[in-house]
Amino acid sequence: MARVWIKNPAAVFTAAEHAPGTADGGIVVEAGRIVELLRAGAAPARPVDEVFDAANHVVLPGLINTHHHFFQTLTRAWAPVADAKLFPWLQGLYPVWARLTPESLELAVTVALAELLLSGCTTAADHHYVFPEGLDEAIDLEVEAVRRLGMRATLTRGSMTLGQRDGGLPPQSVVQDGDVILADSERLIDRYHSTAPDADLHIALAPCSPFSVTREIMSESAELAARRGVRLHTHLAETLDEEEFCRERFGLRTVDYLESVGWLGPQSWLGHGIHFDEREIARLGAAGTGVAHCPTSNMRLASGIARAIELEDAGVPVGLGVDGSASNDSSNLIQEVRQALYLQRLRYGADVPVARALGWATLGSARALGRDGELGSIELGKQADLALFTLDELRFSGSHDPIAALVLCGADRADRVMVGGEWRVVDGRIPGLDLDGLIRAHSAAARRLVVG
């Protein structure tokens, strides 16, 4: 692998807390890792193979997305649920998603990953929980797409076991037997999960939500995750309807339910995490359980405002998630930083720092996924996952602070993205990807899916 000097950047946001250092003179990358952070005017200790002049670029750690549903790119802005809240939104979409095919899923995943990559995202967590007949190898298809685009991912083997017949929300056509779910989970861990520092793939277990899975699959997933050393993910406390469902079905609030099935601990991270009280926030922080804050989706479905500042102050690893493209209708992580900042300012005041929101999309997200030892900040020895943005568009004209400008002026596309020392976005494009052809094929698949 080439030894690369990203030279004299306009600005660098390291996201590092304890040893921030400086990189005014640039970043040297070798063998996929960051090996030098140079002060202004300094040169690399040894010769390099490539020099990239970053004088017009703001450099960030590669952004990390902690919650997504890649398959939902096929149902963006679908009119029948455009104005619905979560439960009727899901009930309208479940029958559509039940028609997913391997071909349509492959297109959906590629679109989601490409959009994330172009927004500066280098690592993405996906929660895939729909396995209709013929889609048994959905996660395998996702693996192929991740590797084709050269990204990193935590792919979660989602599941739904509580159908309408037994008091759940999803139709029986997308519900699976627990033994099938656990056997497939073991298969995926054996085949794809890596604990190497430079791993491109992690597998996690992800029963979908309290209203779509049984207590049994939650407990059994926790036991399997502990035995195999993988993480756990689920939706929790997204809406007040979900809170009421937990009270009626389990006689417990959401965090009590989480603890009762063996999930309250650092091995777990939760999608949304909006409706927690002060005592629950303290319990989550003490346990080290993470939360994926999904501001755009929460606004679109009017689910509420997550208490991200209080959660993080209590010790909860807080990351950002774009959520599925049927409730965000986009997969753009740098834009999600701006939404998170503004939504939290709406709740807590205008002094919530820009850097804090960027921290959620970088080191905070790495912590939520259990990868902060190798990802999420620009520090010596960490993986060379970097996102480079230019400020030469009209929207940035007149701006002064380069890092603040990325967020406040609404950056939406990276100029360069590096993953493990390899350029995966060059001049705003993904080398080797026929984007126009992908859009045509994906749009056609989306039309077929909704008409049945």
Image: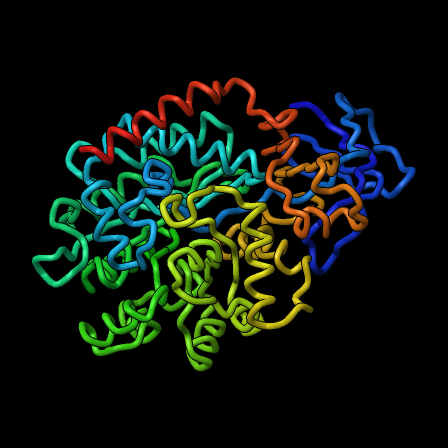
**Residue 370 percent across, percent down from the top left:** 49, 54
Residue 6 relative to residue 203: left or right:
right
Q: Residue at x 42, y 54 (%)?
A: 297
- How was this image coloured? rainbow
**Residue 113 percent across, percent down from the top left:** 46, 35
The C terminus, quarter of image: top left
- Check the image and name the residue furthest to the right: 41
> Taking the image as drawn, is residue 80 in sight?
yes
> Taking the image as drawn, is residue 268 in sight?
no
Quarter assignment of residue 232: bottom left
The N terminus, quarter of image: top right
Residue 403 relative to residue 386: left or right:
right
Q: How many marks?
A: 0
Q: Residue at x 81, y 34 (%)?
A: 55
Q: Residue at x 17, y 45 (%)?
A: 174
**Residue 219 percent across, percent down from the top left:** 24, 62
- Check the image and name the residue furthest to the left: 165
Q: Residue at x 37, y 36 (%)?
A: 192
Quarter assignment of residue 394: top right
> Is 396 situated above or below 283?
above
**Residue 448 percent across, percent down from the top left:** 24, 28
> Is 209 situated above or below 114?
below
Residue 23 relative to residue 128: left or right:
right
Quarter assignment of residue 284: bottom left
Judge by depth and name the residue closer to the eye, 389 or 451. Answer: 451
Judge by depth and name the residue closer to the eye, 356 or 182. Answer: 356
